[in-house]
Amino acid sequence: MTTGLRRRDLLMTMAALACAASARAAGAEPYRGPLFDAHLHYNEEAHGAYPPADVYARLQRSGVRAIVANSRPNRGTQMLASAKALAQAAGVTVVPFVRLYRNRADYTGWFADESIHRMVLDELAAGTPAGPYRGIGEFHLYESKNANGPVARSLMRLAQERDLVVLAHADDDAIELLMRHAPNARLIWAHTGIGGVLESKVRALMTAHPTLRGELSYRPGLIDIDGQPNPAWRALFEEFPNRFMIGSDTWINERWASYAELMQQARVWLGALPAPLALRIGWGNAADLYGLPMPA
């Protein structure tokens, strides 16, 4: 799976460059407003290759003004939160999330591991130098049924009780199960279905669950070959203008290496949308979740 996704990263980087070139040739104007990266990891593999000063420089160059930081282990998020001078100089607000992974082994069994539940409670109690944790995740559910695991249920209910946002990488069936545990929880669906969930299913879930949002990194079918939003997705954005947001998903170092291209790709397809809608997806929807004002 990892090899396949790494190959996809290379293809997506090439596609981003091609899309930008196509947009320039067509005279399209990319979105120029602020970006909120609603799905950013600073995992341990990145710490040496991309120290915080480099990370904040990349964010600043791409016009990213806020990030959801969630990392394996949580020390990565603490590192970004601690670099207050760098964040201020770059004009970036850090929104910290508690991630459920101490190591890679936790990816596949966290939903039934009570020690993960205790770790989350400890992290929430401790907070970060950037302030309290604002959410839980990203977590993965590789099988839908695991959304009914005891820790999955407990953390969804905890998020609802404490008004924390949840970032979940799961299929549509698992999203439905998670929302049953906590119908009023604010849940961001990572990738809005990385496996290519049908747009009709996305629409049905968005209609059924008013607190469900969709994050758009790695989303199959989102953009056409010319870098413009697919008509079916554009229709979803127009139907649910307050529910979608962008992200980078820097889960491996290759994503950090191509960060500028990833953000430029987003700017290209956002530029094809009406300006108010582009601003909502590029910045406002995520900012509203966490109470952030429009950057100066």
Image (cartoon, rainbow, N blue to C red):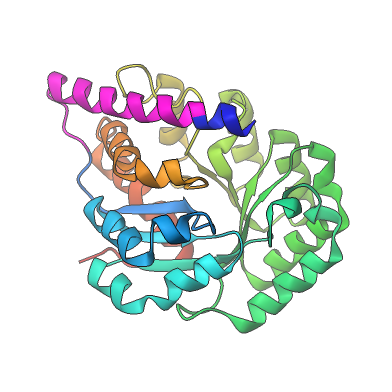
| Residue 111 to residue 235: above or below | below
**In this picture, residue 277 sits left or right of residue 275:** right
Q: Return the residue found at the far front.
A: 48
Provide residue 52's location: percent of width, then percent of height: 37, 66
Q: Return the residue found at the far top.
A: 225
The residue positioned 48% from the left and 22% from the top of the image is: 221
| Image quarter (top left, top right, bottom left or bottom right) of the C terminus | bottom left
**In this picture, residue 259 sits left or right of residue 132:** left
The residue positioned 26% from the left and 30% from the top of the image is: 272
* Residue 218 seen: yes
Magenta span: predominant SS is: helix
**In this picture, residue 158 sits left or right of residue 30:** right
| Image quarter (top left, top right, bottom left or bottom right) of the N terminus | top right
| Residue 214 to residue 166: above or below | above
**Residue 7 or 204: which is nearer the viewer?**
7
| Residue 131 to residue 139: above or below | below
Residue interval drawn in magenta: 7-30
| Residue 132 to residue 155: above or below | below
Quadrant of residue 175 within the rendered picture: top right
